[in-house]
Amino acid sequence: MSSSPIQYSMLIEWSEQDQAYLVTLPEWAQQVYMPATHGDTSDEAVKNGKEVLEMLINDAKKHGESLPPPRIYPD
């Protein structure tokens, strides 16, 4: 994985129906069917979410597409 920080939002929520933590990537909702990935644990969901984000960023750059702007949340 890249050493640069990934500055996009990840929403991680437990799904009783799926019995897994689902990962939604709000800034990428127009490009990717959500949930984008999942994990059996919250740590696994975060890891998988970061991997998906890195793939999306790399793919967009490879094809000369613009990246969606990261959401900025006030302190």
Image: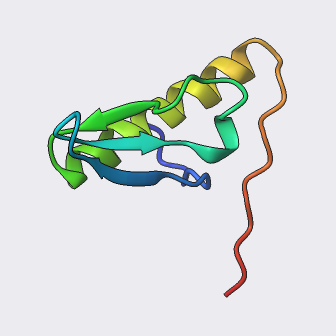
Instruction: Please say if 22 is above or below 13.
Output: above
**Residue at (22, 33) in percent of width and height:** 18
The residue located at (23%, 36%) in the rendering is: 17
Residue 12 versus residue 29 in the image, above or below: below
**Coordinates of residue 27 in the picture (x, y in percent):** 69, 44
Q: How is the image coloured?
A: rainbow
User: Which residue: 78% across, 40% down?
Assistant: 68
- Picture coordinates of residue 30 (x, y %)? 73, 29
Q: In this view, which residue lies farthest toward the bottom?
A: 75
Horizontal relation, residue 30 to residue 38: left or right: right
- At x 67%, y 87%, the residue is 75
- Residue 38 in percent (x, y) is at 31, 35
- Who is closer to the viewer here, 46 or 24? 24
Q: Residue furthest top?
A: 63
Viewer-proximal residue among 52 and 18: 18
Quarter the N terminus occupies: top left
In the displayed structure image, the side of residue 61 where residue 15 appears, left or right: left
Q: How many marks?
A: 0
Say left or right for 41 vs 28. left
- Give the percent coordinates (x, y) of residue 35: 46, 33
Quarter of image, res 33: top right
